[in-house]
Image: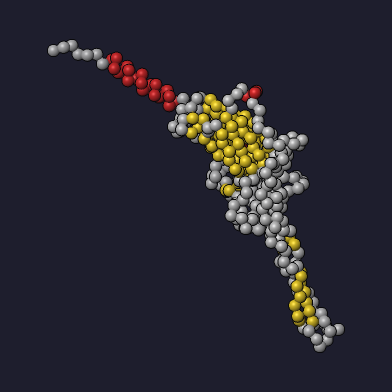
Amino acid sequence: MGAPRPVFPRVAALWALLLALLGGVASQPLGAETMCTAQPLARYSITFTGKWSQASFPKQYPLYRPPAQWSSLLGATHSSDYSLWRRDQYVSNGLREFAERGEAWALMREMEAAGERLQSVHGVFSAPAVPSGTGQTSAELEAHSRHPLVSFVVRIVPSPDWFVGVDSLDLCASGRWREHVALDLHPYDAGTDSGFTFSSPNFATVPQDTVTEITASSPSHPANSFYYPRLKALPPIARVTLVRLRQSPRAFVPPTLGLGAGGNEIVDRLPDPETPLDCEVSLWSSWGLCAGPCGQPGAKSRTRYVRVRPANHGAPCPPLEEEAPCDPDNCI
């Protein structure tokens, strides 16, 4: 009978394999999904283009105090453990401050804390504000194979708590970094202020609501600045483009899109879609006194006024005054 074979080398090998697996798991963000197998790092340019024009959004379009514009862009590259914002979920206190007042410090601290505590945020990036509704701003960002998702927000100014943005866009697909991504953006309500119009005074939503998309029919209220019942969908209010950088960041030159003398303002090559705006009138006033000669039929009248003038071939205004026969109250 031969001598027994030693088991220690086999046990040691199993322990080494187990430790290697545990070490690999420990180096990933908590709750991470399948890790991207692309090269560890990738750099992108991100270009935000505002398409908020008076032709596309004629209803209550802000012309002054302040005019239509965009806040600075604030975002992060992260793993699936982190969420900057998400539809049908509550926003954080930092995002509430940003959506209502454009204050970014609290939101930046939240993102930095998520990176330090959970290692779920790889980097924070920002881009300058756009001083008009149709403008452009850009920045650069870095994504990591363990943090391939990108999220950002831009506040609509003026507005109660409205913003546009992207939630957890995956820059890694099929084990490769995506070369080019372009998305149309639509407005969202942060759920913290109940104002209906761009210039509504502060009116806190109590209790706080979740993030909802603003559409042509929701909120279903004629006072809503984005209420266009004739439309099936709102035209895009903005667009974002991400392009992977192959060169050194210093050598990168963003594509020219008709940059004008107004800094971030641009002149679009294609005309903005014209959104028809129907005339809106007030309710009728009360009937006036019935006037007329004695022994003959009299007449009374009532009036209404224009609340919203039609634009872009919208329905014209109906008559603003009408008369009806009556028996004179005090005949002449």
Query: Measured from the top left, where is residue 145 in percent x and y?
Result: 50, 28
Q: Is residue 229 shown left or right of residue 17?
A: right
The quarter of the picture where residue 276 lies is: bottom right
Query: Measured from the top left, where is residue 178 in percent x and y?
Result: 53, 32
The quarter of the picture where residue 2 lies is: top left
Total numbered badges shown on the rendered structure? 0
Residue at 74% of width from left, 58% of height from top? 309
Query: Measured from the top left, where is residue 34 in percent x and y?
Result: 44, 32
Q: Nearer the viewer, residue 47 or 143?
A: 47
Q: Residue furthest right?
A: 332
Q: Is residue 84 shown left or right of residue 38?
A: right
Q: Is residue 112 above or below residue 99?
A: above
- The C terminus lies in which quarter of the figure? bottom right
Residue 279 shows up from this direction? yes
Q: Nearer the viewer, residue 45 or 214?
A: 45
- The N terminus lies in which quarter of the figure? top left
The quarter of the picture where residue 217 lies is: bottom right
Q: Is residue 151 above or below residue 162?
A: above
Query: Measured from the top left, where is residue 22 in percent x and y?
Result: 40, 24
Q: Residue furthest front?
A: 269
Residue at 51% of width from left, 24% of height from top? 40
Q: Nearer the viewer, residue 198 or 144?
A: 144
Residue at 36% of width from left, 22% of height from top? 18
Residue 204 shows up from this direction? no
Q: Nearer the viewer, residue 14 or 117?
A: 14
Residue at 76% of width from left, 75% of height from top? 323
